[in-house]
Amino acid sequence: MSKQTEKLITILAFSLPVSIFIFAILFLLLVKRVPGAYQFESAELVPIYDKQSLTQTITLEQSGLDTVMVFLKNARLDNRDKFVFQIEDKEILINGYNIGDGDTIKFQFAPLDLPAGRQASFTLSALDTKNPNLAIKAGVSAGDAYPAGELSGRFTPRDLSFQLFYQPVSKKTLLIHSIKSFLNRLF
């Protein structure tokens, strides 16, 4: 083996671990949340108004839930009434101006201090909206698309169209979850 080849092998052997280490550090600094469960199906649009709010139960995959995204539709942007998202003791108030004509709306809040495996629920309501024809509508699945939870009331066993995101308690948890997720996609 020539000296140039040995030098190249030595440089590669040293640079690969250093590159991986730098990537891991940058990853931990840049990535803030981990994607969780989701249900994208939206077979029907269900109105949310004073006589009908929607409550979806979910099962927490880990602690630190801090973002829920829900598919909502404000047809022709007609509705300008107050719209409430509530989960546990947290409540987010927006209005129809914040909801487009078929948008995934992000509700972000301080991380929930609930353990993994526990059931929680979030509610969408619009008490000021009296006319169901002008109501903001939520996407709902045709069947039980998310077996770990359900949409309550007359819509059972269907589910809202939603996505969950977690802010891990530790960077170590984030790194382990990300490596597992990456490896699952490879194999």
Image: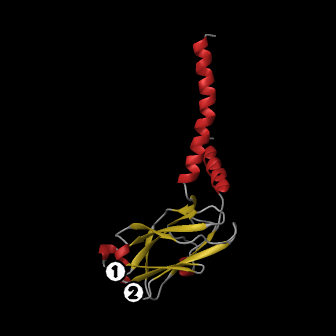
Q: Residues within 10 Å of mark 2 (few under 14, many from 20)?
A: many
Q: Which residue is mark 2?
A: 129
Q: Residue at x 53, y 53 (%)?
A: 30
Q: Residue at x 42, y 71 (%)?
A: 72
Q: Is residue 143 above or below residue 85?
A: above
Picture coordinates of residue 112, whole percent (x, y): 62, 72
Q: Residue at x 60, y 67 (%)?
A: 65
Colour style of the rendered protein structure: secondary structure
Name the foreground residue: 24 vs 167: 24
The answer to which quarter of the image holds residue 1 is top right
Secondary structure at numbered mark 2: loop
Residue 160 appears in the rendering: yes
Secondary structure at numbered mark 1: loop
Q: Is residue 125 above or below residue 179?
A: below
Q: Is residue 182 above or below residue 122?
A: above
Q: Residue at x 57, y 43 (%)?
A: 23
Q: Which residue is mark 1?
A: 79
Picture coordinates of residue 153, whole percent (x, y): 56, 81
Name the foreground residue: 152 vs 109: 109
Q: Earlier in the sequence, mark 1 or mark 2?
A: 1
How far apart marks 1 and 2 lie (CA) works out to 8 Å
